[in-house]
């Protein structure tokens, strides 16, 4: 592994980084590698503990695992950096179910997929690094290419997935519903997950947008999602969080008017730094949409709607960017404009939603379900980052062995933007190849740093 890292570090400051990186093709593939795993034997360890009290630091372990055989159409990537996504939090607290069930189900579909069904799960759905090897039939990528990986894994053997690949019946999220994920020194991906690494970004910056940026793109911008247009008022929950920090940037880039909802003055300040003018601090303003576990409080929906109108000059949101779920969904349906869209990709606070359907049908609103992104959408989202039109939102990074702590902070909602993880990268700030483009965007790239 050290030889691989030396070859990658050889590109640092070189006038011809591609030549340095091409050396990787001649290096042997390590038989084992270090990866962050959950263990099948631990799946019952939190029984009787409420999900919010489960501690990822107890279930995530650094383990030396065998390097899997590379199959046709796959690539082995030396991972320089990855990032924490909420799906790693779900895996680590075994909620709403153990991800070993996903691995078993995947393992049943073919001989090749059987490799994934193991008593350990190497987690992680983001990666930036260098291609080490490609499997049979891969022509687009080769050893030495600097890449990021998006997390859509599809088999595409069924007609259903050939219009929109997210509709493939064998659609999975890599590193969550498959093994050999990105929180590790090596990762196995399907070659069609690879995209060019934005050249003006460091490894940890390049690794951090992937999953959330692509998801926000489909959810907000794509015609499969809310199909946002200029002038739309977009209510964005968790606007300084993983998804929200990208949704906010896309709303601003696309000429829409974001109304950012956050829960502290610090987070409100981050939204303003991104360029948003309309911000609601839900904690400071004390919104409580539920009177008790079973009963919502429509007076609070109304107060929230009035606050939005106060900020927008009387307009309601054309689009509500939803993901908190149970706690906010009733309010989201209520405040959306007549004919407006509530687009949801998650249920962090609970997946059994309640809303008053009269406000949906009488006011001709729509609820759209959205999940990750197809290859094209992920590529478009990565292109925006590569062009310097959407910027990473890394607030801090941890070394691979402290992934548990990083996931713990995301679980406690004690983070801002994205939390990065250095896998092979020995420090932050490495891997930048285009210094000129970086110089133009340096302050925007660092907006979230140290927060
Ligand atoms: N389907 C998909 O493809 C997909 C992709 C990515 C993520 N997700 C899911 O989306 C959710 C969010 O992911 P993320 O990466 O954005 O996480 P994140 O970085 O933790 O950000 C979520 C934000 O939501 C806000 N929030 C949390 N609980 C809330 C509540 N009860 N009421 C109102 N706001 C609340 C928080 O902001 P404030 O406290 O500042 O308000 C937080 O910053 C997770 O459940 C994740 O699994 C789904």
Image (cartoon, grey):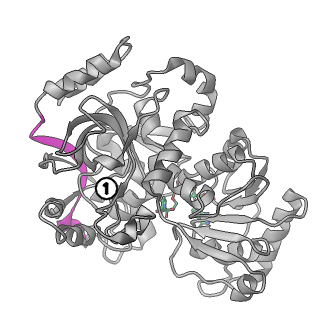
> In what quadrant of the picture does the C terminus appear?
top right
Tell me what residue is drawn at x 9 percent, y 40 percent. 31
424 relative position to 3: left or right: right
The residue pinned by badge 1 equals: 175
Res 2 visible: no
Residue situated furthest right in the rendering: 313
Q: Number of callouts in the render? A: 1
Span colored in magenta = 29-43
Q: Quadrant of the N terminus?
A: top left
Which residue does the image show at 27% across and 60% down from the upper left?
178
In this rendering, is residue 439 above or below 186? above
Q: In the orientation shown, which residue stands out farthest toward the top?
A: 15
Secondary structure beneath dot 1 equals: loop
Q: Quadrant of residue 83?
A: top left
Residue occupying the point 27% across, 28% down:
144
Is 361 inside the magenta-drawn segment? no
Tell me: residue 235, above or below residue 273.
below
Decide which of 156, 81 is in the foreground and name it. Answer: 156
Residue sitting at 18 percent across and 28 percent down?
25
Horizontal arrangement in the rendering, residue 448 relative to residue 152 (left or right) = right
Q: Nearer the viewer, residue 360 or 183?
A: 360
The spot of residue 425 in percent (x, y) is 33, 30
1 or 228, nearer to the observer: 228
Does 32 lie within the magenta span? yes
């Amino acid at each position: 592994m050290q030889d691989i890292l030396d070859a990658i570090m050889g590109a640092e400051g070189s006038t011809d980084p591609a030549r340095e990186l091409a050396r990787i093709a001649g290096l042997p593939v390590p038989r084992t590698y270090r990866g962050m795993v959950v263990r099948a034997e631990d799946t019952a360890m939190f029984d009787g503990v409420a999900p919010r009290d489960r501690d990822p630091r107890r279930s995530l372990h650094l383990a030396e695992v065998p390097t899997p055989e590379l199959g046709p159409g796959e690539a082995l990537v030396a991972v320089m950096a990855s990032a924490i996504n909420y799906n790693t939090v779900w895996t680590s607290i075994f909620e709403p179910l153990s991800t070993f069930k996903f691995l078993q189900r995947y393992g049943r579909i073919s001989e090749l997929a059987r490799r994934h069904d193991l008593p350990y799960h190497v987690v992680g759905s983001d990666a930036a690094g260098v291609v080490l090897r490609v499997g049979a039939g891969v022509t687009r990528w080769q050893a030495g290419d600097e890449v990021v990986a998006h997390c859509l894994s599809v088999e595409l053997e069924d007609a259903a997935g050939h219009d929109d690949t997210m509709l493939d019946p064998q659609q999975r999220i890599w590193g969550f519903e498959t093994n050999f994920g990105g929180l590790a020194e090596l990762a196995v991906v399907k070659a069609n997950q690879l995209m060019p690494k934005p050249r003006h970004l460091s490894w940890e910056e390049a690794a951090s947008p992937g999953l959330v940026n692509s998801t926000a793109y489909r959810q907000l911008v794509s015609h499969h999602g809310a199909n946002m247009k200029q002038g739309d008022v977009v209510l964005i929950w968790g606007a300084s969080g993983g998804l929200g920090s990208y949704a906010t940037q896309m709303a601003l880039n696309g000429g829409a008017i974001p109304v950012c909802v956050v829960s502290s003055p610090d987070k409100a300040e981050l939204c303003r730094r991104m360029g948003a003018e309309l911000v609601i601090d839900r904690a400071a303003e004390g919104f409580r949409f539920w009177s008790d576990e079973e009963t919502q409080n429509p007076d609070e929906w109304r107060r929230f709607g009035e606050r939005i109108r106060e900020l927008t000059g009387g307009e309601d949101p054309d689009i509500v960017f939803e993901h908190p779920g149970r706690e906010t969904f009733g309010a989201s349906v209520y405040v959306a404009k007549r004919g407006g869209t509530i687009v949801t990709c998650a249920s962090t606070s609970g997946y059994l939603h309640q809303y008053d359907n009269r406000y949906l049908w009488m006011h001709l609103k729509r609820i759209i379900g959205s999940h990750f992104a197809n290859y094209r959408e992920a590529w478009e989202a990565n292109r925006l980052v590569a062009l310097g039109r959407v910027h990473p939102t890394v607030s801090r990074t941890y070394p691979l062995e402290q992934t548990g702590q990083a996931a713990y902070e995301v679980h406690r909602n004690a983070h801002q933007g994205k939390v990065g993880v250095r896998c092979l990268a020995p420090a932050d700030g490495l891997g930048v190849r285009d210094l000129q483009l970086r110089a133009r965007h340096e302050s925007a790239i660092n907006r979230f740093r140290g927060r």
